[in-house]
Amino acid sequence: MSLEDKVEDKGSRGFIKKAFKLGFLGAATVGSTLLGLATAGISAPIIGGALAAGGIMGGIKKGKKLYEIVKKAMIDYSAVNVVLNPMIKLGEATYPIFGHIGSKIAGGIGSIVSKSLYALTAYNAAFTGLFRGAEHLLDNYLNPKGIVNSVKDNFYNGWKRIAKVFAPGYLLTANGIHNIFGVNTFAANALPAGYINAAYPVPQAKK
């Protein structure tokens, strides 16, 4: 085989691999949409779509390749649909507890402060871990091998970034505000959050 044939063969394999990945992720978007609708309602695909749209705009701003932009958007969209219901259930079970603790200390203000701090710390850590785990599975054809390392890698910086970009959504929903002028709070927050994360990637931890 000539050098030219080898290059073309390598290019063909690369194209097939990318096409297969996008095909799998296309199926995942359909399946995750159905799951999101069944477990969290219409808010799941809306929030996932907003995050993906923001990521697309940020990816274009960053100058990423089209394949990488599309792949990341499909992974982000599907991951949101998968993890939204568990996060809603976690919030429903835990926000009242922290609100009660805060109210015992400082009344209504204490309740708001307690729930807000919890949202930005422990609750955000749970979301970061679940979301990263879902992304790993989607990017690896549902193969869980290496998922722990994917979740742990640069976790602190990732957790800190998510707390910053999703602070409005966290703080509002933690205190019972789920819609702003009829728009889902997290959907409104997800668009700029997706853009920021794509255009300005999370910095790697210093070694």
Image: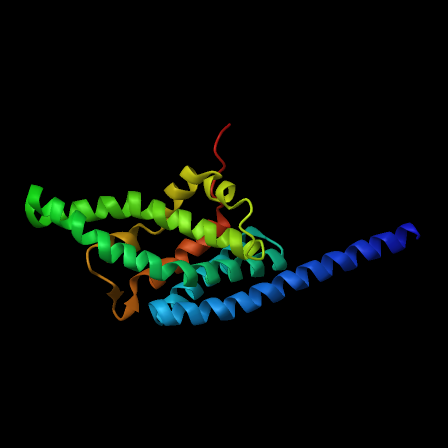
Residue 102 visible to the viewer: yes
Does residue 80 lie above or below 136 as drawn?
Answer: below
Which residue is depicted at the point 66% across and 63% down?
A: 20
The coloring applied to the image is rainbow
Which residue is depicted at the point 69% across and 59% down?
A: 17
Which residue is depicted at the point 51% across and 44% down?
A: 150
From this viewpoint, which residue is outermost toward the right?
2
Horizontally, residue 153 falls left or right of residue 98, namely right
Percent x, y of residue 70: 57, 61
Residue 110 visible to the viewer: no
Percent x, y of residue 160: 37, 41
Does residue 126 lie above or below 186 as drawn?
Answer: above
Percent x, y of residue 14: 73, 56
For the image shown, how many numbered marks are present on the structure?
Answer: 0
Horizontally, residue 142 falls left or right of residue 170, namely right
Percent x, y of residue 81: 42, 63
Horizontally, residue 37 falls left or right of residue 167, namely right
Nearer to me, 94 or 170: 94
Horizontally, residue 158 falls left or right of residue 186, namely right
